[in-house]
Amino acid sequence: MNRAAQLQNHVKTPVRTASASRAGSPTPPTLSWEQVLCNILEHTPLGLYRTDINGEVRSTSGATAGENRLRLTVVERKALTETFCCAMENEAQWSQRFCRRSADGHIRWLQTVIANLRDENDSQIGYQGFTTDVTHEVHEKHEVAVNEERQRLAIEAAELGIWDLDVLTGNCFFSPYCYEMLGYAPGQMQGSLADWINIIHPEYLENARRSLEECIEGRIDKFELEFRLKTNEGKWRWFRLTGKAATRDASGRGFRLAGTLLDVNQAKLMEHLLRMEHDLLNLITATSPVGIMFIEPDGNTAFANPRAEKILGLAKKEMLTCGDWSLLRTIRSPEKDGGEEESLEDVLRQGVCLQNACFLFTRPDGSSVFLSISTAPFLDKASKVSGTVVTLEDVTEQKRREQVISDNDHLLQETQRIAQLGSYVLDLEQQHWGCSSKLREILGIDERYPMTLQGHFDLVHEEFRARFVESYRSAIAHSRPFEMEYKIKRHSDGEERWVTECCEMTLDTAGKKRRMIGTIKDITERKAAEEAIRNLNNELDRRVIERTSQLVAAKKEIESFSYSVSHDLRAPLRHINSYSSILVEEHGAALPDEARYYLERICTASNRMGEQIDDLLALTRVGRAIMKRTNFNISQLAAEVVDMIQDDDVSNAAEFVVHPAINAYGDAALVRLVLQNLLGNSVKYSSRNPNPRIEFGQTTVNGASVFFVRDNGVGFDMAYVEKLFQPFQRLHGSEFEGTGIGLATVRRIIERHGGSIWAEGKEGEGATFYFTLSHPRKA
């Protein structure tokens, strides 16, 4: 029961008496009807209440009057007064609904019913009313109305048709839009279920009947079908039908079904086209020679085609599991001039679109590939970037070819620059030739110079031009190579220079003369050098004749001197050796052992002196005789020298250390002299040390093997090291014997071997002499 009915039950008109004079004649209030109504409404409580004839509340059974006081405007008061006056004069109930704002700020709706109140004499003594809060009821009705309006608008916006089937009668209601979708005018088609079944395509009829029966029998609660219906024009269109049992009986059998009908023909066509596009896209991506990837905003790889898998050496599953930019982080650009590089992750985070940008990637197997990458943002329906499409190509081989071409071009340019060589190509059909930058420099021409065959002829010096033109045209006519040295006059400055030109004819596939390919080399310096060489040769021939005569005379003098030295020195040595031998043989028994020992030493020393004379004589022949270079054991040679120079005084004999098994390459006789001088000097200059130590060995200096002789003698001041190897220059006084020629001889022998010698020392701490010899020639 609604609020209005409740109010009618609460307020009842009092029973009138039979007095004819009182019937239909209500007692008017002492105040105006407008004032009475204002009194009632401004003090009306909720629930049942009574007022006097002027509208003053006398009894209540609800809330206090102040909580439900109504404030009326002038217009409201006038309108309500008219209806109130009419109802009261006609002995009728007055009922109105009001909207008011309560003290807490909420909007409340009140329903008020007022009737005349009479006593037992049927005299009007006041009014009886009932006021109730109908806010909830008003809100519910408003919500229902809003929902119905929303449903109507939604159905219209969705372009849905509605149907309602009475299973018992077979009658089916279809909304007008159902007929409109099929192209039928209102009333043109009957509303029975059979009529609609007749326009279903036979292919889908059985499925539609089965779904309908299953829903009626309760096996399914609702269903959804897609089928084709025949329109009024006789065409088949796709529709989607949804339905469910709206009402079922106690057994669960539906006797009323309802649902919607939607035209999906356009969607079906689009679905078909999308399926075709999807299949075509799959085919294209699967067979594409270019790798294709789709990268989501968070860096995950959502898609990769087979070519991308092959290029990166990763399976699609591996790429899809590489989240958080990890895959893109390893695809890096080659290092720039500044050494900086960036990854594909950096580029995509910056939102930069790439076009054939070069990147480098290392596959899991360790091989590196160059990638040409292009990117494009992928926009969703809201034009918001939802990912990035990345295409990549393996350009490793192309990069290698480009590098080879670049290297070859650079090598060619550098070769032409170093060789002062320029190249050109002459197109015989166009009579036009192009040349390298080096050739432009040689000829002194720029881009404005006419690059014609005649322009080429004009650069030739007048002295050679006629012969050059004749020979060049003859080479073209007979398809033979051309070569000629001639002078040119540079176009830019008129300078005359010598060049040599070589060119050959090339033919096309049909055997027709196509072009001449040639080179021009600046040989001005060579020509000048040839002239200088000719002059120098003439001068050298003159000097050689002069010097040869001088050398012949010097050679004869040296041979004479050598013979004299050899004869004059050997004769006394032979006498010493002979007389010593006679003493030992004839008077050895009469001599003490010590004397016999001395004689033997004299013989040995004289023999060694003879060998030294031979070595010195060989040294004088170093400049005019071939050295006898061999591989020999220099350690053994040093040991022999040590045995020869050891002092007899064993009390202060030097400790010799000779590193064993050191081999050298050179003239052993001359190297013996080197060791005799170096070891002898070490013995001499370390004699004042109570524990003299002399060492010969081999070490490494600046990566090269060198020999050394080291002692702990008096040493020398490094400030005078340059004087060591100069003839007759000595760093010590008369306290040490010597003539100052020994180290000069050593340096001459070392330099003759193609080696070097130097010394290091410190006063009071000894000296070390380092020297090198030549190495054996490789076979």
Image: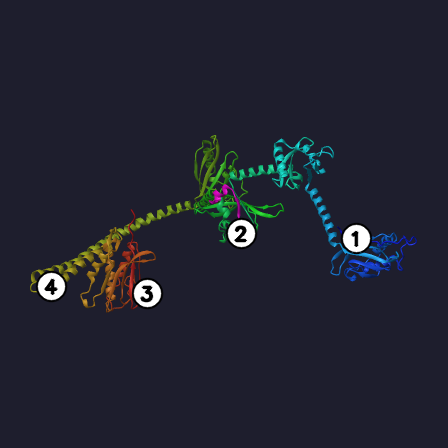
Is disc 3 in contact with disc 4, using a CB cutoff of under 8 Å?
no
- Residue 616 falls within the magenta-colored stretch: no
Task: Name the foreground residue: 192 vs 402.
Answer: 192
Using residue 735 as the reference point, say whether residue 413 is left or right of it. Answer: right
What residue would you read off at disc 1? Answer: 9
Marks 3, 4: nearer the viewer: 4
- List x then y, in percent, for residue 430: 53, 35
What residue would you read off at disc 4? Answer: 596
Q: Which of marks 3 and 4 is nearer the N terminus?
A: 4
Residue type at numbered disc 2: Asp
Q: Earlier in the sequence, mark 1 or mark 4?
A: 1
Which label is found at residue 720?
3
Residues at marks 4 and 2, CA–CA distance in whole angstroms = 99 Å
Q: Earlier in the sequence, mark 3 or mark 2?
A: 2
Q: Earlier in the sequence, mark 1 or mark 3?
A: 1
Residue type at numbered disc 4: Arg
Q: What segment carries the magenta color?
A: 298-315
- List x then y, in percent, for residue 328: 51, 49
Residue at screen point 58% across, 38% down: 275
What residue would you read off at disc 2? Answer: 346
